[in-house]
Image: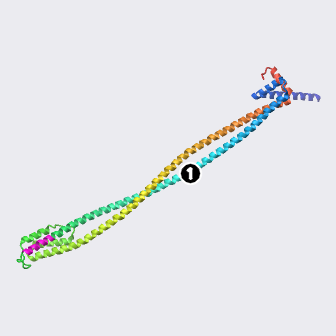
Amino acid sequence: MKVIFIIFLSLLIVQCEKNLSTRIESLLQTQLGHTLLSTAQLALQTNTPLDRIIDTLQDLEDKYQKDQKEEDLENREFQQKCDTDLSNLNNEIDDIKRLKVKIQGAIDQLKASIESKKKILDDKNALRKNLRKGMNEVDVIREYQVKVYEEKRGEVGKIIKTLEEVKLVYAQKLRTNFMELQTDKTKVQPEVFAEVTKQLVSFGKFKSIGKPFQNIIDFMIQMSKNGNNIGVLRNIIDLSESLIRQIDEIWQVERKAEEERVRWYTEYQKFMNTDFKIYDKEIGDLEAQIQSFKDRLAEYQKKMDDLNIRLESKEYTKEDRRNECQQAAYDYTQRRTSRADDRNIVSEVVGLLNVNMRDLKETLAQKMAAGDHI
């Protein structure tokens, strides 16, 4: 049993020595571990008190811890500032997007208003065009009425003048031959009736006096051609006077009708001109409104362009700031890991000095004797 215990103890010692050698070898693989062990060996060779070496290493360990706490605080503050900046940027981006939605709504509304006003304007222009077309048609009708009226007036004037001349000529014949022409049966020279016929035939055919009056004139022409006494002559004169009166009465009716047409046409023009003024004002107002809408639309579109530029800038700034913060967080993690590793190395060396001082000195000496450079 004693032999077994001794063997177990020997194995344990060997294992501990092996573990110690492995730990030292691992420390020597790191730059800091190599430096610390080299420094510790040098201090031991110069008989530096072990407590001083351990205190120095513990001070270094405490400094790592203190530096880490300070950097932890700085990192928290920096990341909080990142969160604040990114939150502010997100709010600004959201505000810009909301404003874009609002302005886009205004743009859509203005476009709809412009289209609506254009439709109304087209309708107004079409109505005005039709109104002008109607006026032109009325003007053509009125010009035709004036032309017809002037033709009638010219014909009626010519008829009345001719009848007056016929009546005057025959009356003069009667007065000249008063002593000879005592009865209706008294003969009249053929040349007298020839002159009468010539005057009546000169009427020709008139459109303005109507068929009944034209028939009377034709009858008078026949009487003149076949006449040979004073009675016929007087009948022609009487018919001329009667025809003059009837034509004058009819012409007065026609003149009043023309005056009524003039009055109606004047009122019509006045009424239509009023309508034109109304249409012109409405069209002018619509055109002004459309132009105003277009000006406002241009302003909103410019604002939208500015917002797009601002939004792009804010999103770029946000992405840049996010990358900066993420890089800072990564760098902080790397430094913290590195500092933790260094602190662990210092702590490992302190542990070796505290627990395995003798073994440490022997192992380091063996490595130097073996030719290893420490």
Residue 141 appears at what percent x and percent y? 29, 63
Q: Tell me if residue 97 can be seen.
A: yes
At horizontal 87% and vertical 28% (from top left) the residue drawn is 13
Q: Position of residue 294 (x, y in %)?
A: 47, 52
Q: Which quadrant would residue 274 be assigned to in this image?
A: bottom left
Confirm whether the magenta stretch covers residue 43: no
Q: Quadrant of the C terminus?
A: top right
Classify residue 11 by image quadrant: top right
Specify whether 199 is left or right of 329: left
Q: Main secondary structure of the magenta part?
A: helix
Extreme residue toward the bottom, this view = 183
The kind of residue tagged 1 is Val
Report whether residue 118 is seen. no
On screen, residue 64 versus residue 16, left or right, reads left
Q: Is residue 356 left or right of residue 144?
A: right
In the displayed structure image, the side of residue 14 where residue 261 appears, left or right: left
Coordinates of residue 42 in the picture (x, y in percent): 81, 24
* Residue 167 part of the magenta segment: yes
Disc 1, SS: helix
> For mark 1, what is the residue?
101
Closest to the observer, 232 or 105: 105
Residue 323 horizontal/vertical position (percent): 64, 39
Residue drawn 80% across the image and 33% down it: 59
Q: In the image as oriented, which residue stretches furthest toward the right?
A: 2
**Magenta span covers which residues?**
164-176
Q: Residues within 10 Å of mark 1 (few under 14, many from 20)?
A: few
Is 234 located above or below residue 25 in the figure?
below
